[in-house]
Image: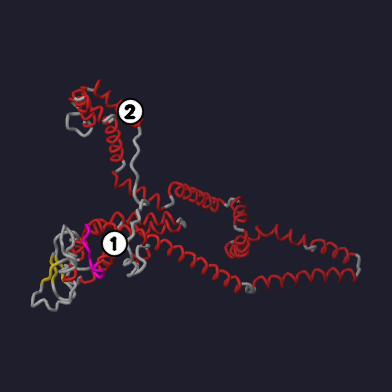
Amino acid sequence: MEGEELGLLGGEGSDSGGVAEEEISGGDGGEETFIEGEAEAQEGEGRQQEEGGAEGEEGERRPGDAKAFPVELRKAFRELSAANPDFQKRFPGAERKITAALFKAGEADKMGGLQNLRAASELVESHGGAEGIHEMAEEVEASRMMEEGFKQGDPILVDTWAKEYPDGFKSLVGPAIERLESMDLAAHDRAISWPLYKTLDRCGVIGTLGELKAAIAGANAEETQKHFNALEHFILELRNFATRAKAPDPLAADREQLNKERQEILTDREKNFRSAIENEVNGHIMGYTNRLLRQALAGRKLRVDTANRIREQINKDLVSAVRQIPNYAERFKAIRATGDHAHSVQYVVSAARQKLPLIVKRVLRDFNLGGGSTSQGAGLRRAVATGDGRGGGNTRTVAGRPQTGDVDFTRTDKANWIASAGRHGEAWLKNGKKAQW
């Protein structure tokens, strides 16, 4: 279930436990701190506009203009303070604080508003915050430099490659030489000429050839045969060595098994990590849901089976609501990939807390328990809507918004169904009846 993958639900029966009183603060933002410097700067700017910009107020900045409003508001505060000294005592610094608030609101509007700022902040956080973005920029720059090095044939790239990934470098040099031979034989021969000569010299072939030449010139048959045999032995050993190098790796099976075991360990670690996130998230959400239910019910008691159905429906609606958050799944996976348990839990809980109050009110209203109703489980609208239609006479219409699983979407438009949340609407049910609410 996708909701479980996002760490919202641990199981159908997980929400029927006791009441939790836990307060969650991970997803809520704190109160914004007032910055005197900004306020004073803005206040000074306003005074300049008042004292030297009378023409601007009368002309460019007419009363009622958005740009003139901060100036007008400051003037109104000064007049009010002058006329009522007690006001200044009761609200010291009110003018400065309101100026700062207007300044911040204006700056937020310049950047696209709070919604855009929040989306940008969440996007940055999903990539590891400022540190993560800095690391990504470094990786992009390194990739660009590496691509340029490949294009220009920079030898430094080979040194870096061999130093950072020695095993991979060793594995690819041979295939690279063979590929060069098939691509450009002349370039291949130039590339291997010096390494080949160095290898023959290191193995004694060059010296043996000189001694063989001297033996032949001196007509010394015994020495000639000895040096020839040494040279022949080298060639045969070279052929055998090349054959073994081309043979299948005898340790390949062991390496494959090691990689498999390593992957299993990583998979188990990921499962444990996700399980820990889900358990903590479920605890937070259950506690917050119970608190919202107690506040909404205001002391009214419910039967256990009714309370369980309400919690189950809240969980289902919560998963559906969270899925509709733009890029929620992608951001959660990115945060989880960092291995930060606290940040992962905070992200999910914050998203859930934003949706839960409205969902709780909506579900209680569907169960005929909202708006001060004294019903305690009897005549529940959602229960009526999801009935099988028997015992209802010959009527084809039932009251109450049904569960999504009971809606016949072959006869009900999905867009209208989604738009009807919290409003009046109608939908066809799978039992053939029509629900209206």
Quarter of the rendering occupied by the N terminus:
bottom left
Amino acid on which disc 2 is placed: Glu
Q: Residue at x 40, y 63 (%)?
A: 279
**Residue 272 shows which numbered tag?**
none
Separation of marks 1 and 2 at Cα, in angstroms: 45 Å
Along the line of sight, the residue nearer the viewer: 327 or 232: 327
Drawn side of residue 159 relative to residue 35, left or right = right
Say if 392 sits above or below 357 in the image: below
Question: Which residue is denoted by mark 2 in the rendering?
Answer: 40
How far from the left and from the top, in percent, is residue 414? 21, 65
* Quadrant position of residue 222: bottom right
Question: Which residue is denoted by mark 1 in the rendering?
Answer: 318
How far from the left and from the top, in percent, is residue 317? 26, 63
How far from the left and from the top, in percent, is residue 16? 31, 67
Magenta region's main secondary structure?
Answer: loop
Q: Residue at x 29, y 64 (%)?
A: 315
Q: Residue furthest left?
A: 394
Numbered disc 1: secondary structure: helix
Numbered disc 2: secondary structure: helix
Q: Residue furthest bottom?
A: 390
Q: Which region is colored magenta?
A: 298-306
